[in-house]
Every structure is written in C-alpha cells, then in structure tokens.
Image (cartoon, rainbow, N blue to C red):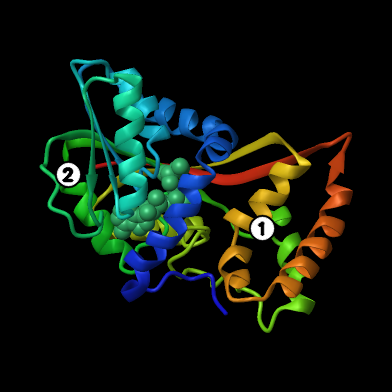
Amino acid sequence: MSDTVLEKDMSAYWDRAGKVWVEQQALLDRLYAPIAKAVVDRADLRAGERVLDVGCGAGATTFEAAWRVGPQGQAVGADISGALVELARRRAGEAGLEGVDFVLADAQTHAFAPRFDAVVSRFGVMFFPDPVAAFANLRRAVTPGGRLVFASWRGPEDNAISLVPLQAAAPFLPAVPAFEKDAPGRFGLADPDRTRTILEAAGWHDVRIDRLDDPTPVSFDELLTMSLRVGPLNPALANQDETVREKVREAVTRALEPHVKDGVAHMNSACWLVSAEG
Ligand SMILES: C[S@@+](CC[C@H](N)C(=O)[O-])C[C@H]1O[C@@H](n2cnc3c(N)ncnc32)[C@H](O)[C@@H]1O
C-alpha cells in the first residue's frame, strides 16, 4: 500500500481526503496557523497586491493573505477539491471578506491570468505528478519578479510522530501505507536539493529553502484524530471491519501515550519554507 497520489487518482483522492479536511478544518487551522503566517510573512505581501494560494483547502492561508493585501488587493484560492472550495467560499462569505475569490482548478494545468504578484501555499504543492510542468504553470501566473512561497513537509524521519501510529497499526493491517520518496504525496518535496532542481527547471530563480519547525501543543484526543482520521491510516482503515479498527485504535492509543505529558503532546510540524522569484 502506498501513500502516494497517482495522477489518474488525483481528483478522486482529494475528493475523499478533502472531506476529511472539511470535517477537521477547525483543528487543522489551529494546528497549522503558524505555518500559514510564516508563508505569508515570507511573501512580504503589500496592500493592493494580488496573491494566489495554491491547494488552498478551506482557505486559511488565503484569508491570512487577504488581510495583508487589503480590500484594494485580491486573494484567490485554487483547489482541486470541490468540497474544500465550497467550504472556503462559505467561510469567506460569513467573514464578509472583500477581495477574496476561490476557484475549483487543477493548479498543474489551469490557465491562471498572468497577473499575480505572489503565489503562496501551505502544504498544497507536493502532489503534482509532473512538478516541473506544474511549477512552470504557476510561474506563468506571476508578473515579472513575482514571488513564490510555500511550506512543504520535511521527511518522515523529521516528523517521527507521524510514523508512530503506522508502526502501531502494522500488525493488524494487511499492509501499512508506505511513503515513497520523491513521489507525489505529503513528502513529495521532502528533499530540498530536488525541490531546488524542480523550481529552477520550471523557471524560478533565487530559490531559498529554510527549515521551519512548529511544535504546536495538541490534546491527546487531537493527536488521536490526527493519527486516525487525517493521516494515512484513514484510507487504510476505510475497508477494515469494526474489530480491526478497534484493535488499531487501541494500539495507536497505547503507542502515543508516551508522547503525551499532562494531557498535552507537542506535534512538531517539521517543514521547509521555500521561496523563489519568477
Ligand atoms: C494537505 S492539503 C492543504 C490544504 C490547505 N492549503 C491547508 O493548509 O489547510 C492539500 C490541498 O491541496 C489540494 N490539491 C492537491 N493537488 C492539487 C492540484 N493539482 N491543484 C489544486 N489543488 C490541489 C488538495 O485538494 C488539498 O486541499
């Protein structure tokens, strides 16, 4: 079993995974808020600018960007998941945010109007089957000198806590999801040398890649939710019967207990903060 997203499956994969992100939007927004802020800070957005948020999900980074560019600017979120675009639009309407728009689009191929001052993304650009073509498409969306800033995951070795649930579940499942190096998926841009090569081949320059760590505290319940609902165990458990699911839940609970002190765990998000110019 693989955690890799195959091209032919991409829309279908995100149709399903997107629903989990919809369900867990409040938790994910809290957990990853510092990452959205780090991305938007690095993009150095100014009032009146136009910014495109790629793989925007429920829109947290788009909203963060919208505050920076103000009502005279424009923040556009693009995502391949209909459920997430719908939620993002609803949230923008409820917040009464001006200058915000969301499009249902495959960022690899969508013909974005070439007018953006910056392209940003929090965890939305690691899933492209042809990353050079995809980042070249995104470069065409920026005006000369436009900025690209995104956060992507470092490898599973740096995100150890994401491996604990998989190892605990392994004895009860026919196969556990495997993270394929350099393949489209959450760790698709984990290798910084490869990321630099991809971006330069796509026409971006002045590539800068820094480590970004965020040990946001989470409750034990939140840690379990991240492990069983949001992480790669979710699809692996989807076709299992209730007995297996219960055994996995118990094993994962036991395995995570040592990572929790006084009801709180620190789930480090070990990322890369990547920036470049078009
Ligand atoms: C890990 S989620 C991150 C969502 C959001 N940026 C956040 O941080 O909350 C990845 C997002 O990328 C979107 N995505 C994946 N491939 C895409 C593509 N080719 N074009 C547009 N969006 C894509 C998914 O639908 C999903 O919403």
Amino acid type indicated by mark 2: Ala
Q: Which mark is residue 170?
A: none
Tell me if I can see residue 156 in this picture: yes
Q: Which mark is residue 141?
A: 2
What is the C-alpha distance between the residues marked 1 and 2? 37 Å
Residue at 21% across, 23% down: 99
In the picture, residue 194 is in which quadrant?
A: bottom left
As helix, strand or loop, the secondary structure at mark 2 comes to: loop
Pointer 1 with pointer 2, Cβ within 8 A = no
Measured from the top left, where is residue 87 in percent x and y?
Answer: 36, 40
Tell me if I can see residue 168 in this picture: no
Disc 2: CA contacts within 10 A as few (<14), some (14-19) or many (>=20): many
In this orientation, which residue lies closer to the viewer: 1 or 81? Answer: 81
Residue at 36% across, 43% down: 56
| Side of 64 where 191 appears, left or right | right
As helix, strand or loop, the secondary structure at mark 1 comes to: helix
Q: Is residue 39 above or below residue 256?
A: above
| Side of 200 where 6 appears, left or right | right
